Image: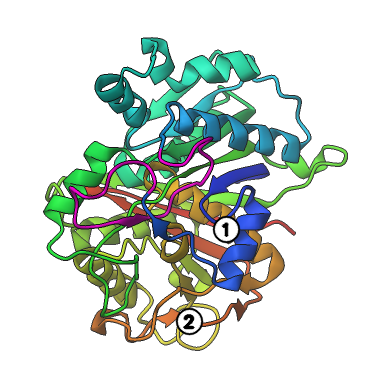
Amino acid sequence: MTWDITGMGAVASIGGSPQEIFASLCAGRSGLAGLRAFDTTKYRARQAYEVDDRARPGADEPGRATRWLCRAVAQALTDAGLPHDLAGVPVLVGTTLQEQRSAELWWREGTPLAPSDLHFGTALRAAFGAGRTYTFANACAASLYALAMATDLIEAGAADTVVVAGTDAIGESAFGTLDRVQNDVPDALRPFDRSHKGMLMGEGAVAVVVQRAPAASAPGRRVHARVRAVGINCDAHHPTAPDPEGITRVVHDAHRRARVTPADIGLVMLHGSGTPKNDSTEAGVLARIFAADDAGQGEGGPLMTAVKSMTGHTLGGSGLLSLVVAALALREGRVPPVLGLTDPVDEAAGLRLVRDTPATAATGLAQIDAFGFGGINAAAIVEVAR
């Protein structure tokens, strides 16, 4: 069974729609800038990948994660040719921080905040009449976990259409924690490069409309891509350190569910968090999985890229954002590069990492990786819609 992606929407530091984001990625434009959300003098890191939409410089605002979520959902519904009425349609939202920043502004500055505004369902109900909203707080794999639930709901006959989304705004508590626990001070997020020093946060939202296949049979309806499978697990190996075995299992599970082999995969959207341990683990696992001479479409295995090099780590929505980019890459035959990759780590030596300029690719299958703290892992397989 496959599931059709008929609508897509996204907001990030490098663009206000999926098409703008994809164009920026292919052009090598980064969203990195000096941190605007709060005073950085208390922290070592001073940069992030923020959405620059505050009304006044130096004054943060509550509800930004919710605002982007509603914007991305509206884009996805319009793109799918559906009315902005989600009564009876499940909406599954992946997040890491939810509206933590709004709570911080209330606590520190007295910014008005109703408890109901901490739940995404309040705004989704007001904007779209959504009555079935669910939030997944599965760290960096949250939105792919939500996608897995969406496919289950459709397969079980509980829904024909599901909206899947992810959103996060940078919170000072999370930024400060990350600033303290990372050994080095990153000035940019550089996945798989020897110069990587750690993760820098990004923000934004993403949404897709998932429908029972074949949605293309509906008059005038476009299908961006088809979900073949989503594999999920939680290896609980360590609070922060990734487990190669847990990641290996989730990738093999996704392949099994999709009924594909490594040789079928032509593109891998890497998790690529820019942290030395995560990069080396992910690269090592994929090198083994795609090690066979005939693994991957084309010499040397599948093409691989990491969008966090330009968007930063968009946390709960990062997996779904990579999936949206994968859908556009499959359709347009272009794969954006990994920005700043000049000297790959040893573990990535055999991987076909896209560098410097976009790569031309005629491939039909992509794998999307998302690995979070606590061993929360997800991998999705999508195919181009013919």
Which residue range is magenta in the image? 36-58
> What residue does disc 2 label?
355
Amino acid carrying mark 1 in the image: Val
On whether residue 49 falls in the magenta region, the answer is yes
> What residue does disc 1 label?
325
Q: Earlier in the sequence, mark 2 or mark 1?
A: 1
Query: At which x and y percent is residue 343?
Result: 33, 86
Within 10 Å of disc 2 (Cα), the crowding (few <14, some 14-19, many 20+) is: some
Taking the spot 27% from the left edge, 81% from the top edge, the residue there is 345
Asked where in the image residue 125 lies, by quadrant, the reply is top right
Between marks 2 and 1, how big is the CA–CA gap?
Answer: 16 Å
- Asked if residue 332 shows in the view, the reply is yes
Quadrant location of the C terminus in the rendered image: bottom right
- Asked if residue 1 shows in the view, the reply is no
Query: Left or right: where does residue 243 sit relative to residue 292?
Result: left
Amino acid carrying mark 2 in the image: Arg
